[in-house]
Image (cartoon, helix red, strand yellow):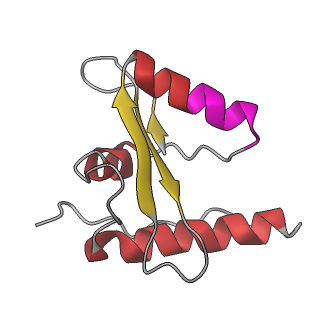
Amino acid sequence: MSDKLLKDDRALAVALAYTPGDAAPRVVAKGRGLIAEEIIHRAKEHGVYVHESPELVTLLQQVDLDERIPPKLYVAIAELLAWLYRVEQGQTADLPDLHIPEDLS
């Protein structure tokens, strides 16, 4: 997940990892500025999809490294992963409107 332009014009990025059978995806990398740009660059370099959503990346920045995403983000992340799975299977599908909460509290 990434957001290229925020109020301070510095990139934010969060990388998630999910393995079937896990309770929820985990935050495996996050950063801003040069670190965010490197996360985005490495993802693209390895063919990993980069989704840009200022609202979602801002919420994910609040999750500690190696922690699972909070239940409030399950629906939005599940929608994104389901869409990505369909795309990887060769199906054409429009990205759904993700149900992103306003905060994590």
37 falls in the magenta region? no
Q: Is residue 37 left or right of residue 56?
A: right
Q: Residue shown at 62%/26% (left/top)?
A: 41
x and y, in percent, of residue 47 in the image: 76, 42
Q: Residue shown at 62%/62% (left/top)?
A: 95
Task: Tell me, yes or no, if residue 92 can be seen here.
Answer: no
Q: Residue furthest left?
A: 105
Q: Which region is colored magenta?
A: 40-47
Q: Nearer the viewer, residue 9 or 97?
A: 9
Q: Nearer the viewer, residue 57 or 7?
A: 57
Q: Which quadrant is home to the C terminus?
A: bottom left
101 over 58 or under it: above or below: below
Q: Is residue 2 left or right of residue 44?
A: left
x and y, in percent, of residue 84 in the image: 68, 64
* Residue 33, picture quadrant: top left
x and y, in percent, of residue 78 in the image: 51, 74
Main secondary structure found in the magenta portion = helix
Q: Is residue 80 left or right of residue 90?
A: left
x and y, in percent, of residue 68 in the image: 35, 66
103 over 37 or under it: above or below: below
Task: Tell me, yes or no, if residue 65 can be seen here.
Answer: yes
Q: How many marks?
A: 0
Q: Nearer the viewer, residue 70 or 90?
A: 70
